Amino acid sequence: MGRELELKVAGKGNTVSLAAAIAGAVEKDGYAHLSCIGAAAVNNACKAVAVAEHMVASDWKAANRSEE
């Protein structure tokens, strides 16, 4: 069994970098494990999840278009 990747979220972290890491984890494992402490970290995580959702959806749409 593989080791689970835990993404530790900081309140002052880069949201887009976190979103890319979340998208990569979701594409690889099907989910992402985020660890947040504090309101600022939770807010940053929520924003990053929204951006990552868009990234994954865009990649999925592009992949399905290329199959047509």
Image: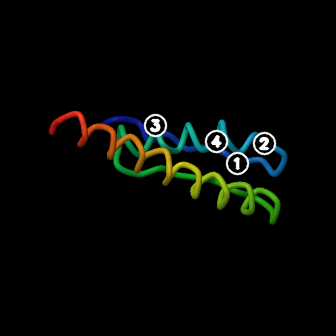
Marks 3 and 2 sit apart, C-alpha to C-alpha, by 17 Å
How far apart are labels 1 and 3 at the CA level?
15 Å
| For marks 4 and 3 on the same chain, the one whose residue lies earlier in the sequence | 4
Say left or right for 45 vs 34.
Answer: right
- Label number found at residue 13: 2
According to the picture, the residue beneath numbered tag 3 turns out to be 24
- Report the quarter where the N terminus lies: top left
Q: Quadrant of the C terminus?
A: top left
- For marks 1 and 4, give the one nearer the viewer: 4
> Mark 1 vs mark 3: which is more N-terminal?
1
Along the horizontal axis of the image, is 2 left or right of 23? left
Q: Amino acid at mark 2?
A: Gly
State left or right for residue 28 relative to residue 19: left
Question: What's the CA distance linking mark 1 and mark 2?
Answer: 7 Å
Secondary element at image label 4: helix
Q: Position of residue 43 (x, y in %)?
A: 74, 62
Closer to us: 55 or 66: 66
| Residue 36, placed above or below residue 14 | below
Q: Measure how far apart labels 1 and 4 are at the Cα level.
A: 8 Å
Q: Residues within 10 Å of mark 3 (few under 14, many from 20)?
A: some
In the rendered structure, are the residues bearing label 4 and label 2 in contact, judged by CB atoms less than 8 Å apart? yes
The answer to whether the residue labelled 4 contacts the one labelled 3, judged by CB atoms less than 8 Å apart, is no
- Which quadrant of the figure has residue 3? top left
Q: Which mark is residue 9?
A: 1
Please tell me which residue is depicted at 70% across the width and 56% down the height of the picture. Answer: 36
| Pointer 4 residue | 18
Say whether marks 1 and 2 touch (CB < 8 Å). yes
Badge 2, how many Cα within 10 Å: few under 14, some, many 20+? some
Separation of marks 4 and 2 at Cα, in angstroms: 8 Å
Q: Earlier in the sequence, mark 1 or mark 4?
A: 1
